[in-house]
Image (cartoon, rainbow, N blue to C red):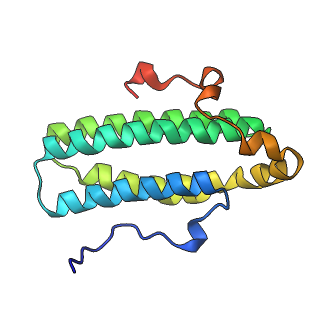
Amino acid sequence: MIYEPLYITWHAHNETGIRLIDEQHRGIVSIINTFYYMMGKHMDNTMMYSCISDTLRNYSRTHFITEEAFMKVSDYPGLEQHIEMHRNLISEIEEIELQGIANHDARPLLEFLKRWWIEHINEKDKLYIPYLHSSNKSHFGRLVHVDPLAQQKDLPDFSSSGW
């Protein structure tokens, strides 16, 4: 068995109780851990950034659309602020990514991603969960059958920033 240490370990306390959100959060943790693994193997920064950046960009965009659709359906009062946080995260990632490529140093991006996990996913995302659970009780069908991608027209367009 090959043992590689993980940069972030998933624990039960990370769960929101919303299966799709939890699966997406696990996916983000997996991307971060893959990035950590690649750094540990001293892979070429350009190749590493290209691989991780594309994966992170696509996965995060899907995740943000999903979260924002759920927040909208559950009438979360902090929706606009959360959307702004997502936009700021995207801008920050892009800036750190460009600096990392120019400086041939991937560590700042890895450190940012861990901070994102701790501060945003484990703290900020937990703020809307009670609204989803509450909405789930009174509007069960709307949450269960929500199609986040169909909701895209009402959500921010990340394409202008390259996301």
Q: How many marks?
A: 0
Looking at the rendered image, the quarter that the C terminus falls into is top left
Position of 111 compared to 105: left or right?
Answer: right
Residue at (60, 58) in percent of width and height = 123
Q: Position of residue 37 (x, y in %)?
A: 23, 62
In this rendered view, identify the residue nearer to me: 68 or 112.
Answer: 68
Q: Where is residue 102 in the image (x, y as percent from the top left)?
A: 16, 37
The answer to whether 11 is drawn above or below residue 152 in the figure is below
Residue at (28, 45) in percent of width and height = 52
Position of 137 compared to 162: left or right?
Answer: right
Residue at (13, 62) in percent of width and height = 41
Q: Can residue 151 be spotted in the picture?
A: yes
Position of 54 compared to 22: left or right?
Answer: left
Task: Choose top left, top right, bottom left or bottom right for residue 91.
Answer: top left
Residue at (86, 53) in percent of width and height = 137
Q: Which residue lies furthest to the right in this view?
A: 138
Q: Position of residue 153 (x, y in %)?
A: 62, 20
Q: Which residue lies furthest to the bottom in this view?
A: 1
Position of 51 compared to 144: left or right?
Answer: left
Looking at the rendered image, the quarter that the N terminus falls into is bottom left
The answer to whether 143 is drawn above or below residue 113 in the figure is above
Q: Can residue 76 be spotted in the picture?
A: no
Q: Where is residue 106 in the image (x, y as percent from the top left)?
A: 22, 50
In this rendered view, identify the residue nearer to me: 29 or 139.
Answer: 139
